[in-house]
Amino acid sequence: MTGAVFHALLSHWRRAPLQLFTLIAGLALATGLWSGVQAINAEARASYDAAAATLGEGRFARIEAATGGEVTQAQYVALRRAGWLVSPVVQGRLGGVRLVGIDPLTAPGGIGPAAEEADISAFLGGAGQIFGRAEVLAALPETGAEPVLAPDVAPGTALTDISLALRLLKRDSIDALLVAPEQPIGRPELAEIAPDLVLRPPQPGSEVGRLTDSFHLNLTAFGLLCFAVGIFIVHGAVGLAFEQRRPVIRTLRALGVPLRRLVALMLLELLAFALVAGVIGVGLGWLLAARLLPDVAATLRGLYGADVAGGLALRPAWWLSGLGIAVLGTGLAAGAALWRIATMPLLAAGGRRAWAMAEARMARGQGAAALALLLLAAGLAVWGEGLVAGFALLGAGLIGAALALPLLLGAALGLAARLAHGPLMQWFWADTRQQLPGLSLALMALMLAMAANIGVSTMVGSFRATFAEFLDQRLAPELYVETADDAQARAVEALLAPRIRAVLPLASVEIEVEGIPTELNLARPDPTYPENWRLLRATERPWERLAAGEGVLVSEQLARRAGLSLGDPVRLGPETALPVLGIHGDYGNPLGQVIVTEALFAQLQPEIVPRRFGLRLDPAEVPEIRAALTGMGLPEGAITDQAAVKRFSMQVFERTFAVTAALNVLTLAVAGFAMLMSLLTLAALRLPQLAPVWALGLTRRRLAALEMGRAVLLAALTAVVALPVGLALAWVLLAVVNVAAFGWRLPMTAFPWDYARLGLFALLAAGLAALWPAIRLARTPPAALLGVFAHER
Amino acid sequence: MLLRLRDIHKSFAGAEGPVPVLRGVDLDLAAGESLALTGESGSGKSTLLHLVGGLDRPDRGRIEVAGTEVTALDDSGRAALRRGTVGVVFQQFNLIPSLTVGDNIAFQARIAGRHEPVRATALAERLGLAPHLAKYPEQLSGGQQQRCAIARTLAARPALVLADEPTGNLDEATAEEVLGAMLELVAETGAALLMVTHSQHHAARMGRRLHLHAGRIA
Amino acid sequence: MNVRLFILLALPATAQAQGFAGLGGTAGEFALPEPDTVLSFPADHGAHPAYRIEWWYLTANLTDPDGTPYGLQWTLFRSALAPREGDGWESPQLWLGHAAVTTADTHLFTERLARGGIGQAGVTVTPFEAWIDDWRMAGERFEALNLAASGPDFAYDMRLEARGPLVLHGDEGYSVKSAEGQASYYYSQPFFDIAGTLTLPEGAVELTGSAWFDHEWSSQPLSERQTGWDWFSLSFEGGAKLMGFRLREGEDEGYTYASWIAPDGRLTPYVGSFAAEPLETTRLGAAELPVRWAVRLPEEGVEIEVEALNAAAWNALTPPYWEGPVVVTGSHQGQGYLEMTGYE
């Protein structure tokens, strides 16, 4: 029996290939977009995790030199001999590769590659071994050591024994000590053994990871939106297919197929489709990710200095989650339709009126759900706190808006019909309104796609605008110079101070403010600062008062985390507490920042001599000054041209844009496709409604034009709704989610031209989607239209 | 007795409370017998047929088919009854549009586990469908579609054939022809036939006839 | 690259297949013990980097003021990747420390790893000091030493005083370990008095008792067929002591040796006479271990039963083995330590 019934069920798709295509394609696209974004994120995260595992970032406390210098071998041995279980780490650059040296004998568990076949005597003895990914091993200069392929080492990193690392890097001291989580009892305080060293507790989450989280969070949100768009499409296709198969289901049951078997077989059918579409989708996602990943990798490297492998590794978890999401999505999309089939009475009952009543009930239910969701979103926006609330707000707001869309459109069309003059226009509006239920799913998908586009492009645009301004602030000096030691620093300052407009010393020390790790920076009183820096909030004459040592500037992150407002005292030492004069933006920095005037800095940190300088000079003088600096022995690499830095930074944003633009085009295409499918399906059903109008004297060409106009009109109305929804989405991402995740808020900038262009694209997509059905209508032979009357019973 | 109905009651929900359709129907049908059920529109003929076929359940009363108490069966039991014992020929044919004529004819026999290709071919031959086996139902005329439905029912060798206005959607000449073929084939298979019709003329061609009036056998 | 993996591979350059912890591997370019070598002290208390493997091993039986028995272990292993000492981080000498504390119902143990060359671990002769991290056995003279070790759940600080001479096993310190002639240099100081403080999470305990020190070095102490050993160091009432071991070859009894040490330190070696027979076993994880033994040395009239104070004295370290205090009854009364390897 099963075989025959399954055959009968499946035969439906042979007769409706377009429906099958919509179903599979919608699901595959949804899965593809979702899993593509996931793949990019997963790849990047795997890279960070490998980096963290290599350096023990995040999991282990570290001991470092208090002044940011090195840890000596003697200090290491002294700590070990005092009972401290610490392990040395050294890192440096070797031919463009980050070389990390560890001591496998003392390293806490899980550091370094978990190579099953690692041979410790080869790692420690003889010529030694260097672990790394293939591209890293290839980039290494000849070292004499045996290269060992280890895919779990962080990208761009080579791992070796500390002895070999020290020899290759020509170093004799250590960068940091990792502190094992379990320590013996009765060991002395750190300060007793090595007063120059400080203990830093483990960072929650690796440092690079946290920096790049902002980017990934946004990508994830985007992937989720893409998936929602796809699921709307599938919901439409499945709903339609099941609706059309209702009579057949009745017949099958009348012929003696038990309901339970029938439902089981339909579930099986859906599962098969989901898996097929899932495999295609994961494949598409793979292609998408492989295509975009090099851009993303470049973005992350440029933005945050985080090394991400440019190639994609096949991860079984990713495949499975792709298939899982396809099945889940199918379940979401088909659940209601299947439920209706399962509870449908065997004998058709009620007829048209009951159906219409049910429809009205559903519309009311949908309206109520939309209202409830929007109220929830509003509540979350006002009272919600934290990341989960931010995402809940995002979800509730978007779904609420989507559900409200048909009601809003219906109201608008009803109003238009009342205001319309002439019978044709009245018919047009009324007919458009009647078509709404059939198109509403596609329109919801279009609305979500547009809102996502507006939201994401606003977010990325705001990101770029903010960062561009931030770069202008921070990179105001024309040249930057980095000196090797204190003597050279003094020499450079002595040389340049009389020759150029200003020499701005730069230095940074990590301190703690209110228990929060914070950079202490200095600013020399100079017009450069007031001219270029824009403070988010400030007291009267902040720069003058800063120069007078009457207060400090704090970064937004520090202000938020420590709860500091203007005027609040900031404790910088046992006897120094100064009020906040202003709050500045310091984007992407996980540490807080405090800026004090140069004199105060020297007083607080007497042992630190600034070794970096920003130089203010006439751009025409740049080559001359550069020559003077190289003339006194500074390497080319120590002198940075501000324009070059800015150019590089902006390039990074362009790459980010390339990624989001590609994803934007794809979602819009998916939404346009949904619209096409809905219109095609409706076209066949609409002949009976169009035939009388045709019979009353409207040409087929005119009818077709009206049909297209209708699609464009609906898309335009949808775009009108999508704009505020998209802006709200952007606001939630920038002002709620970002703050909850990273402690700083991105100022939102609107891009009206982008929105207008997007609206145009949406209209174009709707027009294109309507074109084919319209052409088919224009070419419908009159006999087919006449047939409508013949078949009318 | 192949079919036994005792004191069958059935009403449907209406705007002003339940509307009684059947009010105590008793009926017997022996194996191989043919019975026409006539009555005006709304007299409950089709409802009675649905109850016998297990497509619906009576409010009260007892239905036995081939010794099985239909009224005591659950959904899957009634589905099994329709698969194996009772065959229904509908007024609207109810063919499966996505299957070919050949597959439609074989369908019920297949799900009943009684598919015999030779018998299906012979039936198609007798009903003049042999040249159309690879076509889809929508490519057939109404009379051909109903013949396909009859072949589908008989191919599964039911003990009882229920026919609900089988010629109601056909013009007079075609109706005459289809009915003739159905009666002939049912007689050959030895199945009992319970046919609902509003045509006295068609009813006259059956072995026995009963008239349903105001929910009772008149 | 976890530590466990490390030591399995590092202690010897080969895997477990060849004897316990690879001690049955080939010596390669390392030096081999020669008979008729005269050990010289204090120099030979120090390290012998030309040999592949070496250990300084101290076990002690102690009691607290209430008479509750305690066992204590302090061990420093040296394992060389090459027969030389190197400077700084490049040193091929690897060091491994094991420390344990055993009572009738608890067994605490921990380990440390280090490389030579940087000062984190090593052995010096004058003054004598053997150390790894904060663990040390050190004193101006070898006869009076301080002993300390610490772990996450215990720490101890002890004082050792030698009450008798050093004893040289086998032929004046040349200790044969198999019929094929594998051998090591092996001497002991079994006459240490020990006293000091044991710190546990619940508080400090003052302990006193006696300790047994072993120092042994070789490059290939076991034959390839030898899969593990059972080693006894026993102190009897009256002052006599017995060190005996059997080197198992699979299920076979294998090679046995015993040193009978008179109260004045006079040593009598016995090859093949020593017999140890398991009477009762206990299961610890994957290992089935004898925890009660019948031990005989007929020439000295020894017919005793040796039973573990705590059957669960399993050092789940690198490599894993059993090491714990024992109680002696029978022809002689006393106490001591038992070590069993190659059972897992």
Image (cartoon, coloured by chain):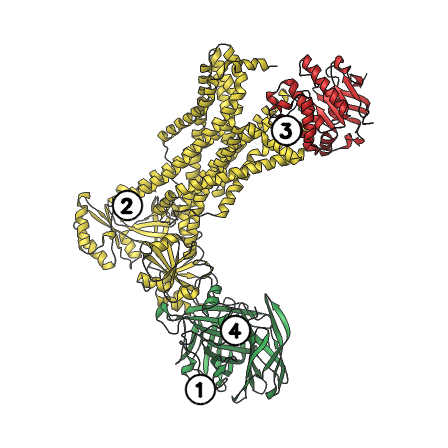
Query: Which mark is drawn over residue B103?
Result: 3
Give the SS element for disc 3.
Answer: helix
Looking at the image, which is closer to me, A351 or A461? A351
Q: Quadrant of the N terminus of chain A?
A: top right
**Which x, y percent locates residue A243?**
59, 27
Alpha-carbon distance for marks 2 and 1?
A: 75 Å
Query: Which mark is drawn over residue C198?
Result: 4
Q: What is the chain letter for disc 2? A: A
* Chain depicted in red: B
Alpha-carbon distance for marks 3 and 1?
A: 101 Å
Query: Which mark is drawn over residue A645?
Result: 2
Do marks 3 and 4 share a subunit? no
Q: Which residue is mark 1?
A: C36
Alpha-carbon distance for marks 1 and 4?
A: 42 Å
**Which x, y percent locates residue A341?**
63, 30
**What's the residue type where badge 3 is placed?**
Asp
Looking at the image, which is closer to me, A535 or C106? C106
Residue A570 versus residue B178 in the image, above or below: below
**Which x, y percent locates residue B183?**
74, 20
Between marks 3 and 1 in the image, the one whose residue lies nearer the viewer: 3
**Colour given to chain C in the rendered image:** green
